[in-house]
Amino acid sequence: MASRKQKARLDSLTIIFRNSQETPEYMANRIRLDSVFNSVMEERRDAATKFLHKNPGSLASLLIINSQFSNIPLFNEEHDIVFYKLLDSCLAKSYPQNKLVLGYHLRVNEIENKIKKRIEVKKMLLPGAIMPAIETISIDGQPVSLSSLNGKVVLVNFWEAGNPVCREKNQELYRIYKRIHNKGFEVIEISLDENRDLLRDVIKQDRITWRQINDFDKGYSEIGHRFNIISVPYSFLIDRHGKIAFVNPSFDKLDKKIKLLLKRR
């Protein structure tokens, strides 16, 4: 599990982070804290993974696969379905009548059904398909309608203000937007942040002027769910006719893809 040195550093950075929330160093401290947290999280997950591999038929594995670090699960039901199925199979052989094992089996079946539904949704969001409607209100209380942007090339981007990778991508997007916005390029961003104060601070710091949506509430985003979003950043590049042209395009080639779509009529 996490070393004492890592725990001490994490605790120290947490205190620094809390004390700097109203200072210019806030985001820098947030990035440092996230980096150490992710390192500790990875170490704990590695140790848990080794245990599961060695003891898939042990009841203790049920505790391990459900374990958390700082209220965040070490294992993701869908990403780590292989582990869930391995335990399900081994435990059923060792404890066929155990109530915990029977309940776990039902849970694994539910996860598999959820994955099947996600695959079905994903098939509806492939290049060439009409982009599903987005009709909602921005964080500033203004109506946002994807259909109102027909005739323009639109990037619909899912992100988190507290995610360093998302902020880095947004900096590149800002440069692209500044260059070709007046040629018919628009951006709609859907934030999956629960901390809306942080979101507003980052929007201001990063000079973001395009449409921002945030419907995240109590760990759930209706829009994120509809678009099958599991991780961020994740985006859809829409052509002038409202069709999906590219799914999650690489940002280093985004400029060229947008210009290509702008040339088409």
Image: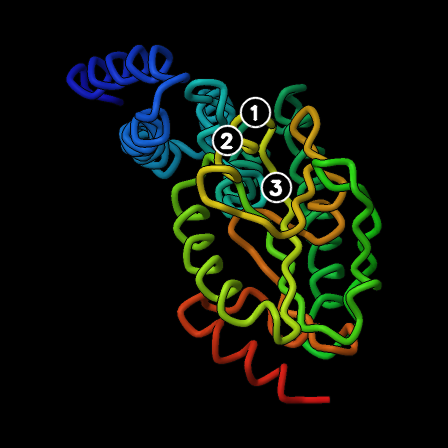
Front in this rendered view, residue 47 or 27: 27
Q: How many marks?
A: 3
The answer to whether 105 is drawn above or below residue 189 in the figure is above
As drawn, which residue projects farthest toward the left?
A: 5
Q: Amino acid at mark 2?
A: Asp
Distance from Cα at disc 3 to Cα at disc 2: 13 Å
Mark 3 or mark 2, whichever is nearer to me: 2
Q: Are marks 1 and 3 in contact (CB under 8 Å)?
A: no
The answer to whether 190 is drawn above or below residue 116 in the figure is above
Q: Are marks 2 and 1 in contact (CB under 8 Å)?
A: yes
Q: Which mark is residue 106?
A: none
Residue 1 % position (x, y): 26, 22
The answer to whether 241 is drawn above or below residue 4 in the figure is below
Residue drawn where x is 75% and y is 59% of the image: 121
Distance from Cα at disc 1 to Cα at disc 3: 12 Å
Helix, strand or loop at label 2? It is helix
Mark 2 surroundings within 10 Å by alpha-carbon count, few (fewer than 14), some (14 through 19), many (20 or more)? few
Asked if residue 30 lies left or right of residue 233, the reply is left
| Residue designated by label 2 | 201
Quadrant of the image occupied by residue 91: top right
| Residue designated by label 3 | 191
Q: Which mark is residue 197?
A: 1
Mark 1 or mark 3, whichever is nearer to me: 1
